[in-house]
Image: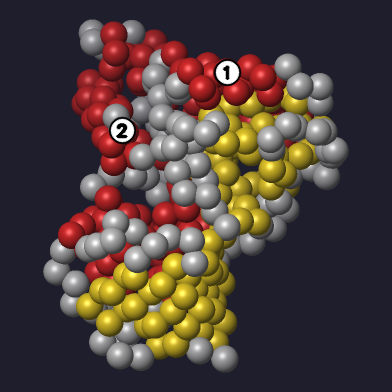
Amino acid sequence: MIRAHAPGRVNLIGDHTDYTGGLVLPMAIDLGTTFEGERGGDRVVLRSAEVPGEAVVPLDVPDPAAAEPPWARYVAGVVHEVRPAIGLTATVTSTVPVGAGLASSAALEVALALALGFEGSPTDLARACQRAEQIASGVPCGIMDQLTAAAGAADHALLIDCTTLAVAPVPVPDDADVVVVHSGQARALAGSAYAERRAQCEAAEAHVGPLRKASLDALATIEDPVVRRRARHVVTENQRVRDAAAALDAGDLDAVGRLMVESHTSLRDDFEVSTPLLDALVERLLATPGVLGARLTGAGFGGAVVALARAGTDVPGGRRLQAAAGASVAHS
């Protein structure tokens, strides 16, 4: 018998920076996905307590993107990358809401890879699961979600360099609450402009070089105003991540809150991935006594808003999240 678990994640700051090799500041959370079952056979057979349909995937799966039901595509992507020698029959349960921007797919991928016997470092695990998601969904996602699930640290956020994949834990102060509030607007990356945004960043990099190293002065030479705005978000967001990590480490919650608001403004105006519902929710949260900052979290286009608040603040409709440890597997 085997039990494998991986957490979801909330990103405090640093969105749409990972796929250009930039900086992010997420934390693994106390919501996650768990597989319980038995190894054996020549197929992976999974039943979900939350999602209808059974995922039945052969070990030599030819085309993960063709698997049915739709959630089985992520299963098939992991099987395709891990290439296990024997199958698995298991039940999957999850407390990560789907479509909320809390990395439910990455939690599934990382936990399943461990259940299938993956051996390697957290970085290797994250890379394999990133490839699995790209194959399964067609979305050219970065590595933040999978690496956070694999390398999470209890009571800490993670400062991740998406060029080197170095991970530096940053303590979350005891007097801070990290709260997530769902907008009520489901998010579907495959049907969104995510790939278009990534292509626009690549167009900017073709002109000025890696956005990780670019200056704001260099961006002024980009003729296309839309591409220039996309690049400006990435360059300024990387700096906000540096500043937020330093402020969080120093316990300066007011500074972290201000940077989160600046991040949301940039995501709304320069990257254009917010929505009226997300904007209204951020404004409502910022008007709540004790809330220091709020921003959309994840890729945008719907999903959730993350807020930073003084400990004990009553945030209507919010769920307080704890910084959790990374993925684990146990045998019995």
Q: Residue at x 29, y 56 (%)?
A: 70
- Tag shown at residue 54: none
Question: Going 42% across and 54% down the picture, which residue do you hit?
Answer: 105
Q: Residue at x 44, y 68 (%)?
A: 48
Marks 1 and 2, the one that precedes in the sequence: 2
Q: In the structure shown, which secondary structural element does the residue marked by tag 1 occupy? A: helix
Between 272 and 266, the residue placed more toward the observer is: 272
The amino acid type of the residue labelled 2 equals Ser
Q: Position of residue 58 (x, y in %)?
A: 22, 78
For label 1, count other residues whose C-alpha is less than 10 Å away and answer few (under 14), some (14-19) or many (20+): few
- Percent across and percent down for residue 232 are 40, 17
What SS does tag 2 mark? loop
Circle 1 sits on which residue?
Answer: 280
Coloring basis for residues: secondary structure
Residue at the location (64% across, 26% down)?
294
Query: Is any part of residue 61 visible from this angle?
Result: yes
Kindly tell me whether residue 128 is visible in this rendering. no
Which residue is identified by label 2? 192
Locate residue 255: give its quadrant.
top right
Instruction: Please say if 252 is above or below 229.
Output: below
